[in-house]
Image (spheres, rainbow, N blue to C red):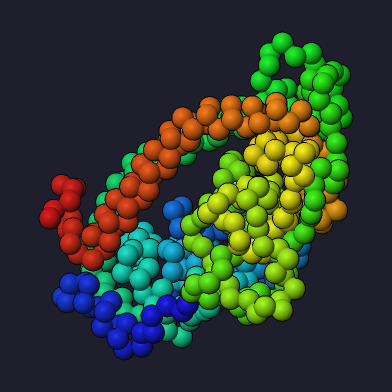
Amino acid sequence: MTPASTGSADLSRILSRQFPQEWPAVPFWSIYRRVKRPSTGTEELLSVYRDHGVVRKMDREDNFNQASEDLSLYQLVHSGDLVINKMKAWQGSAAVSSLDGIVSPAYFVFERVLSSDSLFMHYLLRSSPFIAAYRAASKGIRPNQWDLDPNVLRTFPLRLPPLDLQRKIGGFLDRETKEIDAFIRDQEELIGLLQERRDTMISDAVTNGIDATAHQIAQWDQLVDGVPSHWTVQPLRHGVELVTSGSRGWADYYSDDGDVFLRIGNLSRQSPHLRLTDIQHVRLPRQTEGVRTRTRVGDVLFSITAYLGSVGLVTGSAAGAFVSQHVALVRPRPAVFDPAYLAFACLGHAVQNQLTGSAYGGTKIQLSLDDIRALQVPRPPLSEQRAIAKFLAARLEALDLVIDDARQAMALSRERRLALVSAAVTGKVYLSGHEGAQQ
């Protein structure tokens, strides 16, 4: 589905109405000029985030996008430049950079050509009115493929207050948002600690079992610890009926409804439960070869081209779905593996090390189906597998509730920050000297 079709003139009127009419209106192109500066490929690699603005890529652990091997094709960014991720602008991925470095050639980079306050422009161009405008000016088949139209962007009207008021608003927002961001960082740290505890709990249970009296055998070369003496460790291929993946070319069949289509984004590194949000649908012709990849309850899914280590367990809500070519579908033999246990086992450190490549002597960016078949998985007796899965489901439920609460608090804080920014840059909050916000 494409964004709502909005002409440049209509978009300009919509944007202009949200700002004080006494503020002079100037077109985007008169403030910013698009540039494509060549780089040497040795500069600091930068990314633009919806929540954080322009940051060094190395400072974020949640950016799994692979940089090109040839960074000489990347664009040079100077402090004060506006940087926009053209495919995620509709989510708010636009920011004025305070750093020098390089960004992907898929980004837009603009240099300022008319005097304005960098902080004010940073917040203005990340406010709700402009996020909505980016969305209206973007085109594509589905959200993850929307692309901002630069010809429409350059006509955006910018209603700017006097420079001294720009500075006051920019300074006010910088102070206020820092407090909100500090709270969000605290919640992120809490979530990180809880997820570490979660990961440790899973790894302990699927490697050592839940019987503290069980005798451990010597350390096995793929596992961080030994396994109980009555367990075995075996290649996954010996305990599954099927290992396959989706077919190429399914983008031609995306639709607003129809069969559920599971992608890498539906898998997780923390939980075997599928994230059935942002669901994509397909309508496949009957003769399509990929029909063999319809999921069944108990199938275990693996990411094989990105976000390696992500795992999902198919339950009733996802049964009958199709899987992307980037997802491996594994169907365990009921007599060998309990599906819930297998999904948990593949989230344990031992299998995760294999999935992410460290057990193979280096970081892999892609896995083959043979890599999945070769995974060495600890195998307790079936009754113990079921007990471990039940134990983990119960113990992790309380942790997940705390994690969900922290995520909800972060979401509310982000909403509050966006509302504050939008109110300030649209003139609904005025500043008077150093007295603070005046309604």
Q: Residue at x 80, y 16 (%)?
A: 216
Q: Considering depth in this image, is 406 or 348 the residue closer to the camera? A: 348
Residue 61: give x, y in percent of width and height.
60, 45
Q: Position of 354 compared to 164: left or right?
A: right
Question: Which residue in the rendered view is the most extreme toward the left?
Answer: 439
Question: Which residue in the rendered view is the most extreme toward the front?
Answer: 335
Q: Considering depth in this image, is 90 or 174 the residue closer to the camera? A: 90
Residue 128: give x, y in percent of width and height.
32, 65
Q: Residue at x 74, y 50 (%)?
A: 331
Q: Residue at x 73, y 27 (%)?
A: 207
Residue 420: give x, y in percent of width and height.
26, 54
Q: How many marks?
A: 0
Q: Position of 302 compared to 234: left or right?
A: left
Question: Which residue in the rendered view is the most extreme toward the top?
Answer: 213
Q: Position of 179 compared to 344: left or right?
A: left
Q: Residue at x 84, y 28 (%)?
A: 232
- Could you tell me which quadrant the C terminus lies in? bottom left
Vertical order, 422 against 340 (above or below): below
Q: Position of 33 compared to 181: left or right?
A: right
Residue 84: give x, y in percent of width and height.
49, 68
Q: Considering depth in this image, is 66 or 407 the residue closer to the camera? A: 407
Can you tell which quarter of the image residue 22 is in? bottom left
Residue 108 visible in the shown view: no
Residue 419 visible in the shown view: yes
Vertical order, 388 against 17 (above or below): above
